[in-house]
């Protein structure tokens, strides 16, 4: 006969869903911050000011006056010209990226007002296949540059990219020359172009339109390079200097003009637009 009839309840396993508790460990200082606090702080660590990556929508909300953005050239889409397949067919990768981001391509372009200053704006979307540059991205950006040339509105492009899209091979590399040639026309017409580099900006994007701004801004500690540090180290057999390819290093060596923290970016852009347009 049992002394006690009460059975100790078993520990119930909690349903964690996708496993996300709402707390995020900072990549730099390792401190924990709740996602809601990060969102309030423009996705910057409140302890060390580490700048996390942002989605396209978050960057648009950061820069644009409320309700002022009007998207252009939505008809331009990616196409599988080469019938390319790696571990997946290229059209399947495009479809997955579109479902993930709710966007058709790795760049969104249009007209905008920034503290009341009208401009043409292009924002790259790193969540869309690593912000890779293919023919559709090059076409949309070139059309935006031509629109800027026609309307004489200044151009602002926010870059976030892993480089040229390998699924489009040489056709993606052609976009470097295409966008650069269009920007040369803009320069001859003396229409201002401000380039904003975020983490990461690399490959063919760095080697073309991202580095051709009349003024080049960058977020703090952003990786800005052509080839990544591991590729370089494996090629030359030497380690790069500490902090090489980060925005602070590039500022010291004259590759960019200014490092701007995210909280101050909109105000800085408005000031530059005011100054450039008045001259």
Image (tube, helix red, strand yellow):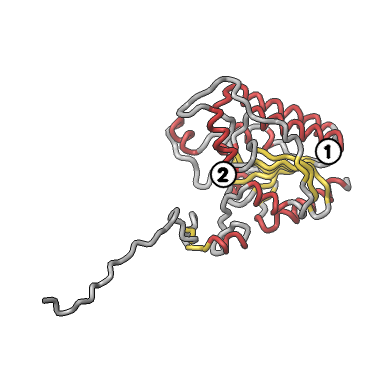
The answer to which of 133 and 35 lies nearer the viewer is 35
The image quadrant that residue 107 belongs to is top right
Residue 16 screen position, x and y as percent: 42, 58
Residue extending furthest left? Answer: 1
Whether residues under marks 1 and 2 lie with C-beta atoms below 8 angstroms apart, the answer is no
Q: Residue at the spot x=23%, y=73% of the render? A: 7
User: Can you say which quadrant of the picture contains the N terminus?
Assistant: bottom left
Rendered position, 118 above or below 1: above
Q: Is residue 166 visible?
A: no
- Structural crowding at the residue carrying mark 1, measured as other residues with C-alpha within 10 Å and reported as few (<14), some (14–19) or many (≥20): some
Q: Residue at the spot x=79%, y=43% of the render? A: 111
Residue 130 screen position, x and y as percent: 56, 38
Residue extending furthest top? Answer: 82
Rendered position, 104 above or below 9: above
Label 2: which residue? 223
Residue 192 screen position, x and y as percent: 80, 41
Label 1: which residue? 191
Left/right of residue 132 with respect to residue 183 in the rendered view: left
Mark 2 residue element: loop
Rendered position, 188 above or below 251: above
Residue 134 screen position, x and y as percent: 62, 29
Q: Is residue 22 visible?
A: yes
- Structural crowding at the residue carrying mark 2, measured as other residues with C-alpha within 10 Å and reported as few (<14), some (14–19) or many (≥20): many
Left/right of residue 97 with respect to residue 86 in the rendered view: right
The answer to which of 8 and 142 lies nearer the viewer is 8
Q: Which mark is residue 200?
A: none
User: Can you say which quadrant of the picture contains the C terminus?
Assistant: top right
Pick whichever of labels 1 and 2 is earlier in the sequence: 1
Mark 1 residue element: loop
Between the residue at mark 1 and the residue at mark 2, the CA separation in whole angstroms equals 28 Å
């Amino acid at each position: 006969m049992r002394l006690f009839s009460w059975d100790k309840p078993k520990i119930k396993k909690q349903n964690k869903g996708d496993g996300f508790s709402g707390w995020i460990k900072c990549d730099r200082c390792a401190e924990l911050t709740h996602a809601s606090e990060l969102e309030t702080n423009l996705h910057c660590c409140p302890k060390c000011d580490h700048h996390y990556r942002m989605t396209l929508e978050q960057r648009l909300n950061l820069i644009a006056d409320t309700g002022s953005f009007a998207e252009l050239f939505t008809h331009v889409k990616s196409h599988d010209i080469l019938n390319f397949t790696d571990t997946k067919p290229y059209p399947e990768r495009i479809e997955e990226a579109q479902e993930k981001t709710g966007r058709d391509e790795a760049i969104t372009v249009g007209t905008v007002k920034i503290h009341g200053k009208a401009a043409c704006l292009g924002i790259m979307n790193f969540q869309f296949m690593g912000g890779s540059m293919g023919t559709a991205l090059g076409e949309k950006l070139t059309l935006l540059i031509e629109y800027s040339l026609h309307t004489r509105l200044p151009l602002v492009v926010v870059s976030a990219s892993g480089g040229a899209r390998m699924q489009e091979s040489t056709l993606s590399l052609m976009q470097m020359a295409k966008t650069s040639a269009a920007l040369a026309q803009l320069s001859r017409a003396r229409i201002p172009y401000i380039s904003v580099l975020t983490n990461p900006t690399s490959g063919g994007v760095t080697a073309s339109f991202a580095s051709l701004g009349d003024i080049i801004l960058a977020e703090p500690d952003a990786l800005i390079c052509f080839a990544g540090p591991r590729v370089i180290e494996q090629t030359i057999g030497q380690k790069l200097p500490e902090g090489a390819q980060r925005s602070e290093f590039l500022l010291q060596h004259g590759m960019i003009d200014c490092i701007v923290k995210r909280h101050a970016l909109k105000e800085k852009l408005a000031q530059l637009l005011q100054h450039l347009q008045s001259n």
